[in-house]
Amino acid sequence: MVALDLAQNTLDGLMVGSSYALLAIGFTLIFGVMRRLNLAYGPTIMAGVYLGTAAFISLGAPILVVLAIVILGASLVGLYVERLCFRPFGEGARTASMVASFALWMQIEEAAMHLLPRHMNPFPALVASAPLEIGPLMLRADHLVMLAATLLIAGAATYLLARTKLGLAIRAVIDQPRAAAIVGIDVERVMMLTFVLASAIGGIAGFLIAATDAQVTAMIGMWATTKGLVAMMLGGLGSVKGAIAGGLLLGVLEAHAQWFLGPQVRDMVAWGLLFVLLAFWPGGLMGAKALDRTMAVGRRV
Amino acid sequence: MLDVQDIVTAYGKIEALKGVSLAVAEGRITCLLGPNGAGKTTLMYSIAGVLKPRRGTIRLGGVDITGQSPSAVVARGLALVPENRLVFPQMSVAENLEAGAYQRRDAAEVATDIERMYARFPRLKERHAQLAGTLSGGEQQMLAVARALMSRPRILLMDEPSLGLAPLIVEEIFRIVAELNKDGVTIFLVEQNVHMALKVAHHFYLMEQGRVTFSGEPGKLAEDEVIQRAYLGTSRQTSGDTTSSHKPG
């Protein structure tokens, strides 16, 4: 029943992919305003998740309290990364920011190992109910929650960007930072707020991922950086819609690869995809047009 | 209204402004002319707070604004139409105008001002939903001017608004400059188009190699000489003489 397998894989892939989409939304917002890569993005999320699970293990915190701690923790660590790796360097020193964010990655991992030295730690599970059956297909209830949360946050992010004053400022900074300063936008403040917001969104993604696994290791940091990066590149840099499409696509491709080629191949898909993308569509599958447009504008100026 | 005293601005070790002093009188059009690389744009960015001067003072309406952030300078009533227009290319014309009013809290008044801009620049109304990056150069320049006006500035700085535009559009830009001035906006204009600039200016400055080398009213210096110095600079002329003196015989 290859058709059924295909359908089930696609469904599973969409569910897992929705967490990738969330990761990519945060990643793309940071990349958009900073124009620099934040390698410490995943570790920031991991720090939030570790603080949450530490509260769960030692104090028995209920799941909503854990969620709040994860979001707050990721936001604060995000602020820390912004202050140390991005604020001090201008756009002229992109490499300095990237290397500094790598150093903080190591620092955050080290701190996490001191907080919870065991390799694997328990995390409160999202929903304990049995999988739903839709005809011949199976659907995990917690995956459904993950998908709903993704849609909710993507909708909120889109509303924020399109309809609010802060959103206008964020888009202005992404579009033309010097002009943003000239019209009176406090660019550094907008960058800081975007960074913290993106880290909080990443924190929610990390929470959902850890909660569907009901366990967490420090590897989630590197995992979140790579999945978020590939999903962001797939969708094209700097677009929320692209981030969602890229995340879902990556999830589906991975699910098929795992089923048909084996679990060892699963993670290779992400790397292979990143390679093919950079070689043939450096603008991303959906970003190519936007990139062309930006370049056309550049030529006119 | 705007008073610049002995400003030095440097990129690393290279001083682009070597002690510039000038004044822009309220209600007038003041022009700054000079060859490429004279430091005109550096001066504009130093006044607007984008670049931090190393020395000197800048006063706006009697208040020291030296080294303040661009957003603080906008709050004091200064708006800049930057070189190369710098519109927000991926945002619509209407959103560009909204961004220009970013610091204002009076939403209803902002909406009326946007309508006023559409009345003044009908092309912008036609294209209000279009992405600014898809506009022609002239339309982008109109948008950059309208965006700057959205902050309701007391003084408008314009950096080469005619750059790269067709003659008819240049005429229109200068007509708008004169109109705005008539409405009471003080204007400080950087230009390469000497002929047009001298036609509208009440007062002009010549800048060469980071220094102000002439200040006066149009007519005080023959237009030929202004053109000569504004395009080529006096130094270029001198070095030309030196070269010829090296010729054998």
Image: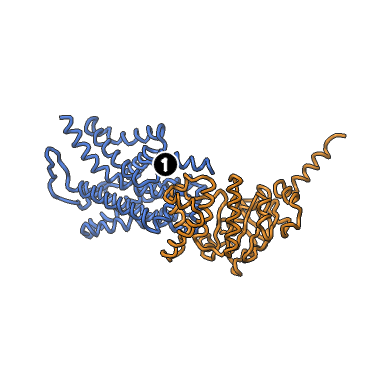
Residue at the right extreme of this rendering: B249
**Horizontally, is B172 left or right of A121 in the view?**
right
The chain drawn in orange is: B
Residue at 61% across, 52% down:
B41
Q: Return the chain for callout 1.
A: A
For chain A, give the colour: blue
Rendered-image quadrant of the C terminus of chain B? top right
Q: How many C-alpha atoms fall within 10 Å of the one at disc 1: few (<14), some, or many (≥20)?
A: some
Depth check: B114 or B34 in front? B114
Residue at far bottom of view = B62
Q: Position of residue B101 (x, y in %)?
A: 47, 60
In the image, what residue type sits under mark 1? Ala
Q: How many marks?
A: 1
Tag 1 secondary structure = helix
Location of residue B220 in the rendering, given as x and y in whole percent from the top left corner: 76, 58
Q: Circle 1 sits on which residue?
A: A290
Q: Position of residue B56 (x, y in %)?
A: 65, 62
Left or right of B244: which side holds A235? left
Quarter of image, res B65: bottom right
Q: Position of residue A242 (x, y in %)?
A: 35, 43
Q: Quadrant of residue A159?
A: bottom left
The answer to whether one can see residue B241 in this image is yes
